[in-house]
């Protein structure tokens, strides 16, 4: 049924409820199930989830910005960036002896790869999915040639800091919580953020309203690349650099954005939702491991979840995400037949 | 179904004594109410559309016309009240013979004309070889309605001009086998005068065959000349229903609640200072796709009109001024743009009125990339009040009626500090009252030293300009100043050399 009326339903304003609660609700549910099955202290599970989730949150925030830029915008180079940034940051840190330089190097690599994508998207009008895929492939091949005979080890100080958990609360989680707040403020309180949300809603209208669409798009991809690079740098210090360090983060980053309540068609970003969805995913991993499912089965489950959420959200329909399922829609009984009678009012 | 053999009727009003007064009603609305969010669109409408009549429906934007039509066409349920089709309570299937042609066309832009017919009229097309059948049907209907339309069923809708899209939209509504009620929403806003005449001739033939037609238009004179009866909608209710014969335009405007200020004049621009004004934008012999050797100048505080038939290069000029990348164009000030196609290039649908209004101005208000919410709110509140935008700053933009949305888009441009405001035929389908407000706004802002370049498909609007360039086939064919600007003069110049049609 493809009736889309340029009516009140198109607007999902503040009264539309909070789309981010569902991720947290799902996370809580999985946590309860884990608690029941394992019968062990739930606090430990939460603490573990909080130390793993931040990595997914960082890359997810970048992906969220890209998705918010409107239909067709996606960054599929994040996984390759994470892997490459892991190697580069470890190498830089061990060469200079400074963890900070390592992290900056990781971010720099992310920005560089994203710059390639950006040039392709804006300069050559390549669709974003192809452009980022190509840039990702370039990054991957560099990663593979670097991985051969790589001997440097991650900075011990940084690793210790990432493992720091006073009173069970990981320091990294707090830092990334602050980062999330900053991204939320970026979207609400800055000219760039407003411009991005405007471009995502209606690119043409934003352009006519004086928004520098190309600059906003470029900034967005570069930010996503930088955040993916940061993820890679931290992850390599936390685990170890490897060629498939970032592999799982492609699907997961898109999934946490969508489950978090950000509109896949753009124009509405929900930074807090990324946290809820990331915790949900990490806990789900734990649960599936506890039950003893294979990796293939895990991926099947995750893919199915993403499709399910997109189905609930109406497949990119702007009419209000999850909440719309539970709200009575003022849809006329006649609507099912009106396509054949009076024609539908397709406004998009 | 085929009206091909019907006698071709003229546009002359029918003899009212044998009029359709006694005929059975096709669709009847009783006490219909409808609320969107915090906007009460309909507050209790009673209306009857009888077989074989043309009922004109007039009212301000925001009076509830669009909503009422949707309810009558069975597209929206009403909150309270009933809609009867042929005297019986309507169920879904009963609306099959009620068809509507939209003002902002509802065609799928990526599909061809024939494919669009299938989308809306599957049930009267064969399952196999439907494409051929649809092409034949729409071709035949277009030939009947708009001789010389120049549309091929294989054209992609996106590639058609606005006028042709409108023709296809109307033809599509008339495609069904049996048509009891045809609803036309501002059908002539994007049609040329010839096409409008053909349309109304066709409407006459339809009504003679017993079809009822509901005509919604802001062009009161047009409604009066075509309709048998006129219903006035005001604040969501029908406040008057009169036979069209004997009504005059001021009567209707009075019934609509307009303050008939006899063609308001806003301190007709001082023609004297034109030459002395400092130039803010200039095209020198601009040539390119759609433009040939166009030279024009915009002075500070000047309202410059771009007139002529639709699509003669006016929009290309606006495009040049909006993005002055070529060397033949110089623009010395910042610009703001008011698009005419508000659904596609105006409205940011997820945002409120306030967010939509401030999006351009916030760049100027912000300090080092950070927004200043208090200042923004003050500006928004000021403009919402100044243009009395219904619903206020907090309402969702899509909850507003078309005219109020357009006010927001206009306010967006004027709230910015731009020195040059480009208007791309923004007042199509906006009611008289709102238009008058906006004309006043343009003159006020010009008096403050802002320049305005204004393309309009409605020549009467050009009277509010200081200077008017008339375009034909990508060239400037005349420059009119002050007293010279009149509808007759513009039309005269537009057609001066045997105007090739289209």
Image: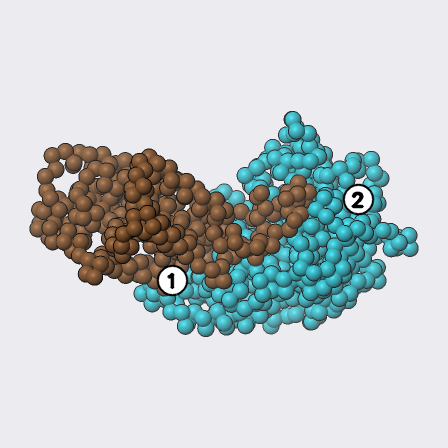
Chain colours: A brown, B cyan
Marker disc for residue A228: none
Instruction: State left or right for residue B403 relative to residue B332.
Output: right
Q: Residues within 10 Å of mark 2 (few under 14, many from 20)?
A: many
Q: Residue at x 54, y 68 (%)?
A: B392
Query: Nearer the viewer's eye, disc 1 or disc 2?
Result: 1
From mark 1 to mark 2, how far is it between C-alphas? 55 Å
With respect to residue B346, does A297 lie above or below? above
Name the foreground residue: A17 vs A96: A17
Name the foreground residue: B91 vs B407: B91
Instruction: State left or right for residue A5 relative to residue A270.
Output: right
The residue carrying mark 2 is B206
The residue carrying mark 1 is A188
Q: In the displayed image of the protein, which residue is found farthest to the right?
A: B17
Tell me where residue B385 appears, x and y as whole percent: 54, 72
Does the image show residue A187? yes
Subunit bearing disc 2: B
Q: Residue at x 52, y 57 (%)?
A: A11
Tell me where residue B258 appears, x and y as whole percent: 69, 69
Does dot 1 land on a helix, a strand or a loop?
A: helix
- Please determine if labels 1 and 2 lie on a single subunit: no
* Quarter of the image where one finds residue A84: top left
Instruction: State left or right for residue A263 relative to residue B29.
Output: left
Instruction: State left or right for residue B231 relative to residue B342.
Output: right
Tell me where residue B318 appears, x and y as whole percent: 50, 53
Tell me where residue B421 appears, x and y as whole percent: 49, 61
Does dot 2 land on a helix, a strand or a loop?
A: helix
Subunit bearing disc 1: A
């Amino acid at each position: 049924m493809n009736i889309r009326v340029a009516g009140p339903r198109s607007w999902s304003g503040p009264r539309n409820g909070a789309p981010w609660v569902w991720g947290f609700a799902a996370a809580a549910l999985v946590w309860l199930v884990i608690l029941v099955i394992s019968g062990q202290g739930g606090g430990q599970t939460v603490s573990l989830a909080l130390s793993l989730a931040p990595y997914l949150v960082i890359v997810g925030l970048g992906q969220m910005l890209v998705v918010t830029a409107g239909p067709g915008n996606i960054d599929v180079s994040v996984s390759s960036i994470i892997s490459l940034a892991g190697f580069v940051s470890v190498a830089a840190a061990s060469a200079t002896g400074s963890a900070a330089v390592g992290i900056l190097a990781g971010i720099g690599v992310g920005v560089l790869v994203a710059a390639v994508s950006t040039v392709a998207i804006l300069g050559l009008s390549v669709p974003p999915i192809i452009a980022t895929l190509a840039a990702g492939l370039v990054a991957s091949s560099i990663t593979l040639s670097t991985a051969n005979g790589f001997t440097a080890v991650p900075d011990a100080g940084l690793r210790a800091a990432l493992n720091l958990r006073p009173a069970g609360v990981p320091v990294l989680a707090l830092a990334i919580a602050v980062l999330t707040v900053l991204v939320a403020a970026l979207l609400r309180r800055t000219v760039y953020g407003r411009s991005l949300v405007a471009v995502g809603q209606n690119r043409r209208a934003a352009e006519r309203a004086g928004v520098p669409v190309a600059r906003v798009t470029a900034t967005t991809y570069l930010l996503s690349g930088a955040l993916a690079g940061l993820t890679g740098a931290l992850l390599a210090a936390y685990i170890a650099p490897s060629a498939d360090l970032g592999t799982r983060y492609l699907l997961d980053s898109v999934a946490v954005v969508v489950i978090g309540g950000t509109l896949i068609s753009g124009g509405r970003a929900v930074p807090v939702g990324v946290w809820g969805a990331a915790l949900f995913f990490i806990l789900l991993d734990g649960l599936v491991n506890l039950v003893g499912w294979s990796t293939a089965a895990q991926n099947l489950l995750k893919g199915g979840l993403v499709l399910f959420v997109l189905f609930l959200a109406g497949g990119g329909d702007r009419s209000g995400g999850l909440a719309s399922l539970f709200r009575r829609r003022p849809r006329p009984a006649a609507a099912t037949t009106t396509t054949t009678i009076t024609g539908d009012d397709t406004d998009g | 179904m085929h009206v091909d053999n019907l006698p071709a009727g003229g546009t002359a009003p029918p003899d009212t004594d044998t009029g359709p007064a006694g005929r059975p009603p096709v669709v009847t609305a009783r006490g219909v109410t409808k609320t969107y969010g915090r906007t009460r669109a309909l507050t209790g409408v009673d209306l009857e559309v009888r077989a074989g009549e043309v009922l004109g429906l007039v009212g301000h934007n925001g009076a509830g016309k669009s909503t009422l039509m949707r309810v009558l066409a069975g597209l929206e349920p009403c909150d309270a009240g009933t809609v009867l089709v042929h005297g019986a309570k309507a169920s879904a299937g009963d609306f099959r013979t009620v068809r509507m042609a939209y003002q902002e066309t509802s065609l799928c832009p990526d599909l061809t004309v024939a494919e669009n017919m299938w989308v809306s009229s599957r049930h009267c097309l064969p399952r196999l070889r439907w494409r051929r059948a649809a092409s034949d049907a729409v071709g035949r209907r277009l030939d009947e309605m708009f001789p010389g339309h120049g549309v091929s069923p294989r054209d992609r809708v996106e590639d058609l001009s606005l006028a042709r899209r409108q023709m296809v939209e109307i033809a599509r509504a008339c495609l069904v086998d049996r048509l009891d009620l045809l609803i036309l929403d501002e059908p002539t806003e994007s049609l040329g005068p010839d096409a409008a005449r053909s349309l109304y001739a066709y409407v006459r033939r339809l009504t003679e065959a017993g079809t009822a037609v509901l005509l919604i238009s802001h062009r009161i004179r047009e409604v009066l000349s075509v309709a048998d009866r006129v219903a006035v909608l005001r604040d969501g209710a029908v406040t008057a229903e009169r036979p069209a014969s004997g009504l005059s335009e001021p009567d209707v405007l009075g019934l609509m609640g307009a303050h008939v200020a006899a063609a308001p004049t806003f301190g007709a621009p001082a023609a004297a200072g034109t030459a002395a004004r400092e130039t803010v934008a200039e095209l020198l012999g601009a040539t390119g796709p759609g433009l040939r050797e166009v030279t024009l100048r915009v002075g500070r505080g000047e309202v410059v009109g771009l007139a002529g038939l639709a699509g003669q290069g006016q929009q290309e000029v606006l495009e040049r001024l909006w993005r002055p990348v070529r060397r033949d164009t110089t623009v010395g000030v910042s610009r703001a743009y008011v698009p005419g196609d508000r659904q596609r290039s105006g409205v940011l649908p997820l945002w409120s009125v306030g967010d939509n209004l401030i999006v351009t101005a916030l760049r100027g208000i912000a300090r080092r990339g950070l927004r200043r919410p208090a200042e923004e709110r003050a500006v928004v509140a000021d403009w919402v009040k100044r243009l009395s935008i219904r619903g206020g700053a907090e309402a969702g933009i899509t909850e507003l009626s078309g005219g109020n949305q357009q006010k927001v888009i206009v306010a967006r441009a004027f709230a910015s500090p731009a020195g040059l405001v480009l208007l791309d035929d923004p007042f199509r389908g906006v009611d008289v009252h709102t238009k008058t407000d906006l004309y006043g706004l343009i003159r006020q802002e010009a008096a403050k030293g802002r320049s305005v370049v204004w393309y309009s498909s409605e020549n009467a609007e050009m009277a509010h300009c200081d200077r008017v360039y008339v375009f034909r086939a990508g060239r400037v064919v005349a420059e009119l100043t002050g007293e010279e600007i009149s509808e007759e003069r513009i039309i005269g110049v537009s057609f001066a050399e045997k105007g090739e049609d289209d």
